[in-house]
Image (cartoon, rainbow, N blue to C red):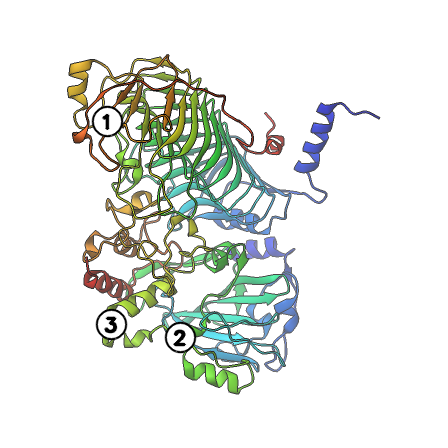
């Protein structure tokens, strides 16, 4: 019923796009107007259910990822034939108009949703697609959805597929929508080199400071692990051009001002998100730090990040807790 | 042909209100309100009106609007209710991130976080919107009822907010602001203007809050240097609700019984207000009290002018350490309470009609235990307040039809 209603309402905006044949990406679906009703309209996958990419679609991973209820994520970048991404130092790869980023979320051993970022002439467009039970098709979920799912940790949650506006909440830079993940500093040197060798990247960027590989966190110092996690999980909003700019909290990897990072910083508009605590980060005292309190909450108005999770990230919380505990007072 | 000015204004208003291809998108209450309403908000085109039907919209998540020039209009603040009692996620009930939006004639109830937030949303109008936490004053209520931030051009008119655990109407890091004819009741702060400039706060009723109307400037924020604002012709009456803000927030330090409070800021006029029975202080002017590390921040109030206000009672139950003792010695405190911090002749001028008690604090950050209270003699207002550029752009009035 819900889907039917959605389909009716979407009639005007959705574009009918002929399904491509033979595993070739449908460039007009990426760059044309409107929103394709089905993920298959784009032709990003030769075998969608198996997530086997079509020609021109390259899988990648990032060093320290955004945590999403423990979902396994499959990431792909599509570049139109004959185009190249441009390296920009440590920062985001500059992807040409016509490019797309595709991210599929897997839980309970099945595909749940695929989010796409399409680079159109007027800017990036972010759209969510929800997979059906049969795993044969993913349909546009413009208004988002809630699903009863179980996390890999065995926790029953109300999983949220973000709506189109919520996509922008995280992907916002000033008034524009921008990618978050594929920054050179959050990609491995090996992948960047192979992407360059494949003729898809103009040069291998020399990265001055790379985020750690998340799986290596136990072997690494507390600060880079925690700061990497904060960069990937918080800084897309908590930066001077992001959705949470008004908080004055800036959790980007390159930030070095202690106050901007929340250290001995008082809350501004936290409301009950303060948890009765005085500072975002109180050195040596994770239990008295608002940051840890909000990471550990699932309540609307308290929990951080505000969108994109319905359970607590135990490893992220441990990493940030360790960083604050070891911090000199 | 000469057109009378009123007709021209009306024609302009119509042109603004109804762009060529504007359409009305009706959204009735009923099943799957979340999906239907959110889709309407996403698919609306600039100039469209999303028309909410009468009834209760049962919502499960936050809503958001990111299309310029859209009007969201209900059937009245009692008739159309967006009910967020079962909200599972998001930091607010409705989030607006586009410019030139009008929100009118509906209510938002029981959001988990803030009621309605508009961020970076220039020229926004909130008209006859109600935001209520129906359980009354509770620490577990959301922080702000109506919450525009980082915006230029804000008009909030005829709204009602109650139950906010921080501020009923909170305007932050914005400029060109009008907050008028609203009723704010039973919040921690009734109205709070923070790190903002060019605000006109007039003709509001603030009662039964912890503090009625606050004008603050805080450190370590992207936008600082608040001021050039008028607090005028408001009714600020019996703000006596015990402070229920969660600790850590700046308003948690506002004493119960505060009428109008200015903290830091440069250039504020307080005039023509009716202040009745605010037990701590009818008008309070203070420096930012906490330690801070921000070289660009000035914690002192400057150029604050208190003109003639109508003051009845109050100052009889001051809720700060040593307050009761002061009343025992002096009787009820005078209309104006000043912490004594600031540069003499630069900080504060007060109409001869009002007496001022200075706490004579020795330095910024000192506690009231260090106070040496005495009556202060301050110069009377010497020049008229320059109102140029204060308040929301006049063009926003065209979106209001009374």
Classify mark 3: helix, strand or loop.
Answer: loop
| In the displayed structure image, the side of residue B281 where residue B392 appears, left or right | right
> Vertically, is B107 above or below B291?
above
Q: Looking at the rendered structure, which numbered label has been put on residue B360? A: 1
Residue A153 visible in image: no
Residue at which label 3 appears:
A221
Q: Nearer the viewer, residue B32 or B226?
A: B226
Classify mark 1: helix, strand or loop.
Answer: loop
Quarter of the image where one finds residue B394 = top right
Q: Chain of mark 3?
A: A
Residue B293 visible in image: yes
Among all residues in the image, which is located at the extreme front? B344
**At 29% from the left edge and 23% from the top edge, which residue is drawn?**
B337
Judge depth for marks 1 and 3 and give the one in front. Answer: 1
| Gap in angstroms between the C-alphas marked 1 and 3 | 50 Å
| In the displayed structure image, the side of residue B96 where residue B91 appears, left or right | left
| Gap in angstroms between the C-alphas marked 3 and 2 | 18 Å
Judge depth for marks 3 and 2 and give the one in front. Answer: 2
Residue at which label 2 appears:
A208
Judge depth for marks 1 and 2 and give the one in front. Answer: 1
| First reached walking from the N terminus: tag 3 or tag 2 | 2
Q: Nearer the viewer, residue B242 or B39?
A: B242
x then y, percent, for residue B246? 27, 40
Classify mark 2: helix, strand or loop.
Answer: loop
> Vertically, is B155 above or below A242?
above
Quarter of the image where one finds residue A309 = bottom left
The quadrant the N terminus of chain B occupies is top right
Q: Chain of mark 2?
A: A
Asked if marks 1 and 3 fall on the same chain, the answer is no
**At 19% from the left edge and 54% from the top edge, which residue is drawn?**
A287
């Amino acid at each position: 019923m819900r889907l039917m209603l959605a389909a009716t309402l979407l009639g005007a905006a959705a574009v009918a796009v002929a399904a491509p044949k033979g595993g070739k990406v449908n460039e007009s679906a990426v760059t044309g107007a409107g929103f394709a009703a089905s993920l298959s309209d784009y032709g990003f996958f030769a075998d969608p259910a198996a997530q086997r990419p079509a020609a021109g679609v390259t899988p990648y991973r990032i060093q320290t990822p955004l945590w999403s209820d423990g979902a396994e994520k499959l990431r792909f970048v599509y570049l139109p034939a004959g185009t190249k991404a441009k390296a920009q130092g440590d920062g985001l790869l500059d992807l040409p108009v016509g490019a797309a980023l595709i991210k599929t979320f897997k839980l309970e051993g099945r595909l749940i949703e695929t989010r796409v970022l399409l680079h159109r002439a007027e800017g990036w467009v972010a759209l969510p697609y929800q997979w059906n039970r049969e795993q044969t098709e993913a349909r546009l979920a413009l208004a988002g959805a809630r699903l009863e799912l179980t996390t890999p940790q065995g926790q029953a949650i109300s999983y949220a597929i973000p709506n189109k506006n919520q996509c922008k909440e995280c992907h916002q830079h000033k008034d524009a929508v921008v990618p978050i993940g594929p920054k050179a500093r959050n990609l491995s040197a090996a992948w960047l080199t192979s992407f360059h060798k494949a003729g898809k990247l103009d040069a291998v960027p020399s990265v001055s400071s790379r985020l750690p590989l998340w799986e290596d966190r136990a072997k690494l110092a507390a600060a880079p692990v925690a700061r990497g996690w904060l960069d990937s999980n918080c800084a897309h909003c908590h930066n001077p051009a992001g959705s949470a700019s008004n908080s004055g909290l800036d959790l980007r990897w390159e930030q070095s001002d202690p106050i901007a990072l929340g250290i001995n910083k008082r809350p501004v508009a936290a409301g009950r998100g303060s948890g009765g605590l005085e500072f975002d980060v109180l050195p040596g005292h994770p239990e008295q730090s608002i940051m840890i309190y909000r990471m550990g909450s699932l309540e609307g108005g308290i929990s951080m990040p505000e969108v994109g999770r319905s359970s607590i990230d135990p490893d992220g919380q441990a990493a940030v807790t360790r960083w604050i505990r070891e911090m000199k007072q | 042909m000469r057109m009378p000015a009123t007709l021209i204004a009306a024609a302009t208003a119509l042109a603004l209100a109804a762009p060529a291809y504007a359409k009305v998108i009706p959204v009735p209450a009923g099943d799957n309100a979340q999906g239907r309403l959110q889709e309407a908000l996403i698919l609306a085109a600039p100039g469209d009106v999303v028309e909410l039907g009468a009834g209760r919209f049962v919502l499960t998540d936050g809503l958001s609007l990111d299309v310029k020039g859209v009007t969201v209009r209900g059937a009245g603040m009692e008739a159309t209710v967006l009910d967020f009692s079962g909200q599972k996620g998001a930091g607010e009930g409705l989030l607006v991130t586009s410019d030139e939006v009008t929100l009118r004639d509906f209510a938002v109830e029981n959001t988990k976080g803030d009621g309605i937030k508009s961020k970076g949303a220039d020229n926004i109008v909130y008209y006859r919107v109600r935001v209520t936490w129906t359980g009354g004053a509770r620490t577990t209520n959301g922080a702000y009822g109506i919450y525009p931030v980082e915006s230029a051009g804000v008009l909030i008119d005829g709204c009602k907010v109650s139950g906010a655990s921080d501020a009923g109407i909170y305007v932050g890091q914005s400029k060109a602001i009008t907050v008028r004819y609203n009723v704010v009741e039973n919040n921690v702060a009734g109205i709070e203007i923070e790190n903002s400039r060019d605000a006109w706060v007039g003709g509001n009723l603030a009662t039964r809050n912890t503090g009625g109307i606050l004008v603050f400037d805080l450190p370590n924020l992207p936008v600082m240097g608040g001021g050039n604002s008028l607090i005028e012709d408001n009714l600020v009456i019996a703000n006596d609700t015990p402070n229920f803000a969660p600790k850590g927030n700046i308003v948690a330090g506002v004493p119960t019984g505060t009428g109008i409070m200015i903290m830091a800021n440069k250039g504020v006029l307080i005039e023509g207000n009716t202040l009745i029975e605010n037990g701590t202080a009818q008008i309070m002017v203070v420096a930012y009290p906490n330690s801070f590390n921000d070289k660009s921040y000035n914690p002192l109030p400057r150029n604050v002018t208190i003109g003639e206000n109508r003051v009845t009672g109050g100052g009889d139950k001051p809720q700060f350490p040593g307050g009761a003792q002061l009343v025992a010695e002096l009787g009820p405190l005078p209309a104006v309470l000043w912490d004594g911090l600031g540069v003499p002749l630069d900080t504060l001028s007060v109409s001869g009609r009002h007496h001022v008690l200075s706490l004579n604090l020795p330095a910024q950050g000192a506690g009231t235990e260090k106070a040496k209270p005495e009556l202060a003699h301050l110069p009377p207002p010497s020049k008229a307040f320059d109102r140029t550029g204060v308040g929301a752009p006049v063009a926003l009035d065209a979106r209001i039809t009374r």
